[in-house]
Amino acid sequence: GGMGRIWIVVESLYSMDGDFAPLKDMVALADRHDAFLMVDEAHATGVYGEQGRGLTVPYEGRENLLVVHTCGKALGAAGALVTASGVLRDFMVNRCRPFIFATAPSPLMAVAVREAILILQQEPERQQRLTKLVAFAHREMRERGWKSPSDSQIVPCIVGDNARTMRLASALQARGFDIRGIRPPTVPAGTARLRISLTLNVGEDDVRAMLDALIEETKGELQ
């Protein structure tokens, strides 16, 4: 209607399907329509991009880009970071009511986040190990005849039926694998799933054992 500024809001990596947003296309779209692009990097922070800065690294510094990084998950703390151009940052500091009137994070949490960021900068081997583990897991899946719809560290196993999903999750947990069942309304009806998240807390032998257990419990009917 010609009123106000358009905002395009996406996740760089989606948490339930493990798929990536077409950020290059989103940036071009925002430029074409003089829009702001807001990207949630919650599941990419610490995993992708130079020094774990996420999938928006190639677009850093753009005046129409605002990025949210969680301080939980990979950074192991709590809260979030918002990164943007200096002009947009100053505008939010002075005009964003929730920011102005919210309770500030504790100094302890700020120190924990800063230390986590330093670890990402100074110990790139952590990120490299996870990248190799994710590639290994997807290779092992393909060798077992399972082509996951994801190429990331988030691997969904679509079951469909809610009750069967939870039975499978319980069976896998009983075998020592912390795999959770996800049901509607978190995911669309008919797409209940097991959500596998690969982390540095496991190794290749764990991944092999988990995939073998998954195939046994699903009787080879992996989606």
Image (spheres, grey):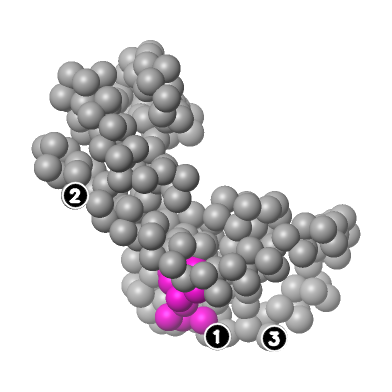
Q: What percent of the width, then of the height, locates residue 180? A: 45, 28
Q: What percent of the width, then of the height, locates residue 75? A: 60, 58
What residue is at 76 percent from the left and 81 percent from the top? 90
Vertical placement of 26 versus 63: above or below?
above
Q: Which of the two discs, 3 and 2, labels the residue nearer the N terminus?
A: 3
Which residue was labeled with disc 2?
Answer: 139
Q: CA distance from mark 1 to mark 2?
A: 36 Å
Helix, strand or loop at disc 3?
helix
Does 58 appear in magenta? yes
What residue is at 26 percent from the left and 55 percent from the top? 135
Q: Quadrant of residue 101?
A: bottom right
Three-letter amino acid code at disc 2? Answer: Arg
Which residue was labeled with disc 1?
Answer: 61
Asked if residue 64 lies left or right of residue 217, the reply is right
Vertical placement of 165 versus 136: above or below?
above
- Picture quarter with the C terminus: top left
Which residue was labeled with disc 3?
Answer: 87
Q: Which of the two discs, 1 and 2, labels the residue nearer the N terminus?
A: 1
Q: Residues within 10 Å of mark 2 (few under 14, many from 20)?
A: some
Number of disc labels: 3
Q: What percent of the width, then of the height, locates residue 109? A: 77, 57
What residue is at 34 percent from the left and 66 percent from the top? 22
Q: CA distance from mark 3 to mark 2?
A: 45 Å
Front-most of 170 and 203? 203
Three-letter amino acid code at disc 3? Answer: Val
Between circles 3 and 2, the one closer to the viewer is 2
Three-letter amino acid code at disc 1? Answer: Gly
Helix, strand or loop at disc 1?
loop
Q: Quadrant of residue 24?
A: bottom left
Query: Mark 3–mark 1 contact, CB under 8 Å?
Result: no
Q: Which of the two discs, 3 and 1, labels the residue nearer the N terminus?
A: 1
Query: Magenta region: which residues?
Result: 49-60
